Structures are given as C-alpha cells and as structure tokens.
Amino acid sequence: MRFSLSPEQEELRSILRRFLERQSPMGQVRAAMTGDPAADDIWARAAGELGVAALAIPEQYDGAGAGFVELAVAAEEWGRALAPGPLLPTAVAAPAVLLASGDDEACARILPSLAAAELTAAVALDGTGQPPAVTAVPGTSGWILTGQASLVLDDPAAKVMLVPATADGGLRWFEVAAESFTRVAVPTMDQTRYLADLHFADTPAEAIETADPQGVLTRTVSVLVTALAVEQVGIAARCMELTLDYVRTRQQFGRPIGAFQAVQHRCAEMLLRLESARSAAYYAAWTADGAPAELPRAASVAKSYCSEAAAFVTAQTIQLHGGIGFTWEHDAHLYLKRAKADEALFGAPAAHREL
C-alpha cells in the first residue's frame, strides 16, 4: 500500500479545499444551520461541477471510477469545512449498497443519476448502524413496508431511500420513493448535520435483488464508519490549525502563549492524536478497495481511535482559545459538537473496540 497520497489525490484535495473555502465559509455553514436553502447550492455545485458524487461510482455507470481513498479525501475536506450537503448518504452509503448488492438493473437505473447529481439518495440505517425496525410483506404489486427507522443519516431532499427490512424471517433490501414515507427531522447537538426519523406505513417498495443481504449491510456500515473516521480527521486537522494560529498570536506576559511549555505540551499531544488518527483512517480507506476482507476490522479500529482523537483535539481547541473558545461567535464549538455527534453515530468507540 502507499503511505502517502498520489499527486492526483493531492490535486483533488487542493481543488476541494479551494472550492469549500470559497463556497462554504463558516458563515455559509451557520446559514445552513438555520435552514437557509442557499446552502443546497454548495452540494449541487460540488457534485455537479467537481464530480464529488461520482467519485466512487464505476465508469460503466457514468461515474468517475475512482477508489475509496479518493472518496476519503473528499470526506476529510468536507469535515474540515463542516460543509453542508449529503456527501455521506448520497456519495458513500447509497452507492455502497447498490454496488455490493450486485443488482445490475438497480445500479443501471439509479447510479448514473447519482453520478450526474440529478438525484440524491440515502440509506435507512438506525443511528446505531443496525437495520431499522421495519418489516416487509408481499403486496399486490411489489412489497409493502411498515415500521420506523431512527436517527437516520439522511438528506431532506433525497428522492430515493434504500431500506434494509425483515422479510420472511430474514434481511432483504428495498428501494422506496421519498413521497411514500414520512421523515421527521430530529434536533441534535450538532446543528450542521441532518438526522431524521423515518416512518413507513403500508409503504410500497421495490426489492433490490442480492444473494448476500447481510454482506451488503456489513460493507455499507464499514464504509460509512470509515468515511466518518476520515471526516473526524478533517475536523481535528482544522482545529489544530486554528489552535496553532491562535497560540502564536495571543500575547500574555509579553510573549505568545505558544512559548509556554504547558501550551506546547497540549499542542504536541493534539498533533500526536491527529497523525495517529490519520494513519488509522486512511488505512481503513485503503482496505475498502485494496483488502476488502480486512475492512470491517480496520473500520472499527479507525472509528474507535478517530472518534476519541477528534473529541480530544476539539476540546483542547476550546481550552487553548481561552474565553473566546466558549462563545457562540467562535467556530470552535461547531467542531466540538460535530466531533461528539460523530463519536456516537454508528457505534461509540467502546462498541467498536469490542468488535
């Protein structure tokens, strides 16, 4: 495996960073928190003009044919900017389900529209990463779903929902149109991300054919957990930058506070946690294509370590910024809230260490 990004991957990072710095400054992120519809333009442009939505989709379905490491680069930059938009549900989770299923008809029908940014989609996994309490029974034409999914990593504009449900005593996957079910936004500590409860009541659904429904679930959860870990690296990296800029310029007793050994020790520990998290996250991203059998374990290692690293770095960022770090006007609390929410989403660190 490579221990550094290729020139092409570094160029992708540079392009995405410049784009998000221009199009998604923190003022725009705060606007998205209040439901400003203008924030939707960020994803539309990133997906349409830069091809972010197409990264993990094979060329046969009009995608970019890139690997998961390229998608991880995008996830890191998305986390660094706290950018709005359905990167995880639409560009990570939905393609993972469809490609792992082996259902060529469903792939050919949905993936080109995702790649072209004409459609957004999501996967109805509970916030624990488990299948929801949804059952499926045969209907007069197709299937009927009943039940609820809680704390789903969703997109309010998603037109397609991919749902794992219990049918005939086992797990099966289904495609559901957005107008066929009810989604209710869930207020959470992290206002920069959209989570929803989904309610299915005699909801018509179309089966996604796969020989290994459980394998599809395992693959999907693993790539989502890995993408979250890489996002946490982006969060920690940005907080590290903010902190170093501050301790270099904040004066106390006639010199920068970064000159004090106690502050230096904290910054050194932040850097150690960040770089270790980066190694764990990108190894997991590499296994997604390079060693798929290792992915579930590598994903749990990455999620466990990166969750705690991001929580530590963001907390230290607030502490080292002193009084301004605790204010609503400063961005530090937004990163802390995202880090803490990501820590709980799809399994806490202790659960992943057990895995």
Image: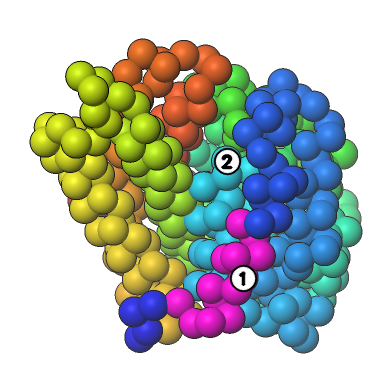
Residue that mark 2 sits on = 82
Say if the magenta span includes residue 6. yes
Residue pictured at 39% horizontal, 77% vertical: 4
Residue 200 placement: quadrant: top right
Residue pictured at 69% horizontal, 42% vertical: 24
Across and down, in percent, residue 348 comes to 32, 40
Quarter holding the N terminus is bottom left
Residue pictured at 61% horizontal, 70% vertical: 12
Q: Is residue 233 left or right of residue 259?
A: right
Q: SS class of the residue under badge 2? A: loop
Residue 249 placement: quadrant: top left
Q: SS class of the residue under badge 1? A: helix
> Where 106 sits versus 131, above or below?
below
Reading the chain from its start, which is encountered first: label 1 or label 2?
1
Residue range (magenta): 5-17
Residue that extends furthest to the front in the rendered view of this protein? 254
Dot 2 amino acid type: Leu
Label 1 close to label 2 by CB (< 8 Å): no
Q: Which mark is residue 12?
A: 1
Across and down, in percent, residue 317 comes to 34, 31
**Residue 330 seen in the current view:** yes
Q: Residues within 10 Å of mark 1 (few under 14, many from 20)?
A: some
Across and down, in percent, residue 8 comes to 58, 81
> Where 326 sits versus 170, above or below?
above
